[in-house]
Image: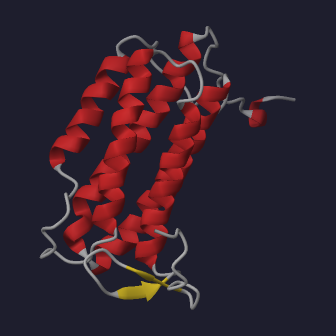
């Protein structure tokens, strides 16, 4: 099978379950941004992040394929795919609780960065937030995807905690945001 089909050369793409739409449709922005987030998580997993965090990220990468497939499938009647479930968000909540239990409580905003894995986790978080904004727009026209919106909201929270965890694993403390209005 060839990787190129030439069916998208006119600026349209196929949707799961049939139908075609413009490549700049909000639905395509939504699942394309989810794919971008997933790719960044693939980069994170090339670093030494420990087997626990790596295992969670592997599960999230697989779950993001479910999210993408869900977003690529308009309407509620498409039962041929796995849809995002409340259990997927609950999994993230459990992971957040577990990771946060070993982190010092935050008392102020922190800057994104630290070790490379943490920096990429912060990048993944911001891309996840962009996906969340696109899915918010998509839900206005196709409410089927409300569970995906909840999942992405929880995922961005998880990625923040995961970045803090990655830094803590290598002994890099959180860097508080400096309030320049108080200096001088």
Give the quadrant of residue 117: top right
Residue depicted at 76% across the width and 37% down the height: 181
Question: Which x, y percent locates residue 121?
Answer: 55, 35
Q: Nearer the viewer, residue 57 or 108?
A: 57
In the image, farthest residue toward the front: 1
Task: Describe residue 12's horizontal placement relative to residue 143 as left or right.
Answer: right
Q: Where is residue 167 drawn, in percent x and y? A: 58, 18
Taking the image as shown, residue 160 lies to the left or right of residue 9, namely left
Who's the residue at 44% across and 25% down the image?
Answer: 54
Q: Is residue 94 left or right of residue 33?
A: left
The answer to whether residue 68 is left or right of residue 24 is left
Q: Quadrant of residue 155?
A: top left
Identify the residue at horizontal 24%, vertical 34% (top origin): 91
In this picture, is 142 found above or below 31? below
Q: Is residue 6 above or below residue 104?
A: below
Q: Please identify the quadrant where the C terminus is shown.
A: top right
**Residue 66, image quadrant:** bottom left
Q: Number of labelled discs? A: 0
The answer to whether any part of residue 157 appears in the image is: yes
- Residue lying farthest top? 171
């Amino acid at each position: 099978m060839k990787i190129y089909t030439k069916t998208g050369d006119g600026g349209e793409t196929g949707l799961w379950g049939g139908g075609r739409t413009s490549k700049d449709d909000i639905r395509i922005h939504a699942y394309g941004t989810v794919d971008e987030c997933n790719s960044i998580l693939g980069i994170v997993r090339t670093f030494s992040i420990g087997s626990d965090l790596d295992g969670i990220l592997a599960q999230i990468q697989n779950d993001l394929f479910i999210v993408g497939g869900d977003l690529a499938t308009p309407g509620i009647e498409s039962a041929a795919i796995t849809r995002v479930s409340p259990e997927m968000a609950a999994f993230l909540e459990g992971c957040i609780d577990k990771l946060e239990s070993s982190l010092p409580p935050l008392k102020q905003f922190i800057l994104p960065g630290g070790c490379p894995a943490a920096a990429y986790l912060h990048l993944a978080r911001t891309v996840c937030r962009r996906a969340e904004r696109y899915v918010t727009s998509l839900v206005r026209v196709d409410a089927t995807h409300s569970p995906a919106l909840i999942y992405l909201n929880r995922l961005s929270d998880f990625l923040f905690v995961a970045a803090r965890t990655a830094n803590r694993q290598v002994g890099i403390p959180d860097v508080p945001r400096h309030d320049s209005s108080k200096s001088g």
